[in-house]
Image (spheres, helix red, strand yellow):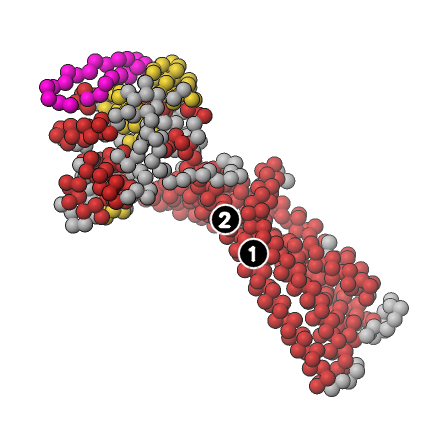
Amino acid sequence: MTPEAKAAGKALSRLQKRGSRSLLLAMAAPLVGGGLLVWQAWTLADILGRAIEGGEAPQALLPAIGLVLALLITRAGLGALGEWFGAVGAETIKQDLRELLFSSLLSRSPRRGEMASSGAAVAAIVDQVEALDAYYARYLPAMAQAALLPLVFGAIILPLDWVAGLLFIVTAPLIPVFMALVGWGAQRATDRQAKALTRLSGRFGDRLRGLLTLKLFGRAEAETAGIVAASEALRQRTLNVLRIAFLSSAVLEFFAALGVAGVALYLGLTFIEFLNLRSSPLTLQLAVFLLLMAPEVYNPLRLLAAHYHDRAAAKAAIVEIERQLGELPTEAKVLHDIAPLPGDAIAVTLDGITLRTPDRQRLVLHDTSLDIAAGEHVALVGPSGQGKTTLLEAIIGLRQHEGRIALDGADLGDWPLESLRARSFLLTQKPRLIHASLADNIALARPGASRRDIEQAADLAQVTPFADAMADGLDTIIGEDGLGLSGGQAQRVVIARLFLRDAGLILLDEPTAHLDGALEAEIMTAIIGYARGRTLIVATHSAAVAGKLGKSWRIAGETLLPAPLPARKKGVA
């Protein structure tokens, strides 16, 4: 067994604890049903013996027949109950694991270089987690039955007839041995199938997101052909897995049929007195009981073989999840809704910082230091492409950097993620707008904000004037990525989010890029007023915006240099 497979087995065991109560009941129900099966078989054999050998009247057998029917119904109910508990336990585990993986993704920086593509992440969280269902719902109960019931049945049969018991003891262990041999090949085939599924899901998801670009560059047909080829490869790998699964079932059926046939042959030869290996005569009741129990001894092993490939699929799924998203987290990161926190200003210290562009090909800053006092308002100026965005994202922990970044004297890495997110606010150049109302889009900054707070934020960001012109005002529904709004209107909606946050550190990246001069002045006045007592850093190429702030720095020659502030016009705040 490979180290990856061993680690996957341990991970499956850890996850099993999350649905332990339901899974224990799922495994206990068929075990109780197995005990009732012995009672049922003995009672049915007794009925036949009394009716055929004893010649009893049918009326005398009615209570025993009623007992057989009651046992049969009870066993069916236990079987259904076991399946239900198995499904509940599996769903609990899958839901908990998806929450763990999702919270782990949310806790990471979206700029991390080793982050899986969105398509691969979705495939891991949805498809690969779903592959664990059969392992917990069916394989584990089948494993419990296969481990205990044949031993119990053998212990009951051996004192009654040592020959039949010996046949079971010799043939039954051969089944799991050959299952293990087949299972090695099944694990490798399933690993390859899981990788192919992830690649196909990730490729399809990423191509779907870039469909417009592919059409514009005439690559749609080529990518469609590539997805068709990948789908065919996945189909072949899936058929290989099924072929191995069918092979394991055939091996089991062969040995099970061999064992049942051996018992039947022994009983037949004993009845015609061709064999005489017993010290006492073989009664019809005992012979019928042995014939009824013969297939039941192998049935738990047959059930295990039917679900044995589910174990390989689950291990392959765990390996693929960890390959795409990293080691499985043991507990979820607690991500509460962001509530207003004291907006005390946060000092920013850059000490020997070296930053590179996202592709790691060009230096943005090299061994640069800067102190921004708490409550200070600073502009980062310069043309596009100089690294202003990269610096802002590094300050908030979204970019890798060399050197030390400290907030209020504490290293950035020492800040609890939830506290850092709650006490800071970052407005990017491409903020996210969702298919929802204007009010809901603004409230993303603080879920649970009151209507009054949302309206006040809309007023400060100059959203109210154009919202009032719409039929439903702030309740007007917009499309994904702000469909239905102009660039300036969308910009004002995301700026409104700032006014719902009581952040001590405010980072704005080109906040007025889509606004005309008059709106720019009004909104910057509102932002500066709101940022009093807070640290404000604005990346901008607008001299007017920089002129409203206290200090100005520009990136030049891989370092930060003071930039002269434009002279303020009289009467301009």
Q: Position of residue 547 (x, y in %)?
A: 18, 20
For mark 1, give the secondary structure: helix
Q: Where is residue 304 in the image (x, y as percent from the top left)?
A: 63, 55
Look at the image and tell me in which quarter the C terminus lies: top left
Residue 381 visible: no
Q: Which kind of residue does numbered mark 1 sit on?
A: Gly
Q: Which of 186 and 407 is in front in this view?
A: 407
Q: Nearer the viewer, residue 165 or 63?
A: 63
Q: Which residue lies furthest to the left in this view?
A: 570
Please tell me how crowded label 2 is: few (under 14), some (14-19), or many (20+) other residues with Cα within 10 Å. Answer: many
Seen in the picture, residue 48 relative to 237 is either above or below; the reply is: below
**Magenta highlight on residue 126:** no
Q: Residue at left 35%, top 38%?
A: 339
Q: Which kind of residue does numbered mark 2 sit on?
A: Lys
Residues in magenta, as a range:
548-573
Seen in the picture, residue 354 relative to 172 is either above or below; the reply is: above
Q: Where is residue 14 in the image (x, y as percent from the top left)?
A: 58, 43
Q: What predominant SS class does the magenta segment belong to?
A: loop
**Magenta highlight on residue 572:** yes
Residue 522 shows which numbered tag?
Answer: none
The residue beneath circle 1 is 86
Q: Are marks 1 and 2 in contact (CB under 8 Å)?
A: no
Q: Is residue 339 left or right of residue 265?
A: left
Mark 1 vs 2, N-terminal side = 1
The residue beneath circle 2 is 94
Look at the image and tell me in which quarter the N terminus lies: top right
Q: Residue at left 23%, top 14%?
A: 563
